[in-house]
Amino acid sequence: MVFLTAKSGNEDRIRSLTSGAIEYIPKPFAVNDLKLRIAAILKNIEEQTEWQVEEMKRSLIEILSKSGKSGKIKDDYIFLKCRELGFAQRETEVAVLYSTGMSYKEIANRLFISEKTVSSHIQRILAKTNTNNRLIF
């Protein structure tokens, strides 16, 4: 949220920023200044997203390499499919390990989560991929 406001008091500014505002811009403001601030916010979001994608990719490659089933083309393909389907990071990790043939128990041990949590993730994954077997991708 970017607040454009006639209120310029410090209390209003603090309340807005603690409520989740990214920027607090009191009137009057220069349109060019507003455009530059918004451009900077969007650039920052884009850079953070790229960093998160690369971090997730490294995490998946590490998981696959530990499972002994790593291959650069396969890693990229699975990662892209998970992103395309809107998987969360943990769902992606579970999907990768599940597709390699690991049991729920093995996945749970590898990711330090319960088998019940693995089961829940796999149910959501299968629903998102509209399938009912390990050949998710």
Image: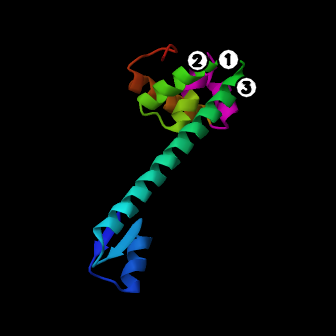
Query: Which residue: 62% across, 30% down?
Result: 60
Q: Label 2 to label 1, Cα distance in Å?
A: 9 Å
| SS at circle 3 | helix
Residue type at mark 2?
A: Lys
The disc label shown at residue 69, or none:
1
**In front: 97, or 34?**
34
Residue type at mark 1?
A: Lys
Q: Is residue 97 magenta?
A: yes
**In front: 5, or 66?**
5
Up/down of 128 relative to 101, above or below: below
Q: Label 3 to label 2, Cα distance in Å?
A: 15 Å
Q: Label 3 to label 1, Cα distance in Å?
A: 8 Å
Residue labelled with disc 3:
66
Between tags 2 and 1, which lies in front? 2
How would you classify the magenta stretch by its main secondary structure?
A: helix
Query: Which residue: 46% across, 31% down?
Result: 83
Q: Does the residue at mark 2 contact the one at mark 1 (Cβ under 8 Å)?
A: yes
Residue type at mark 3?
A: Lys
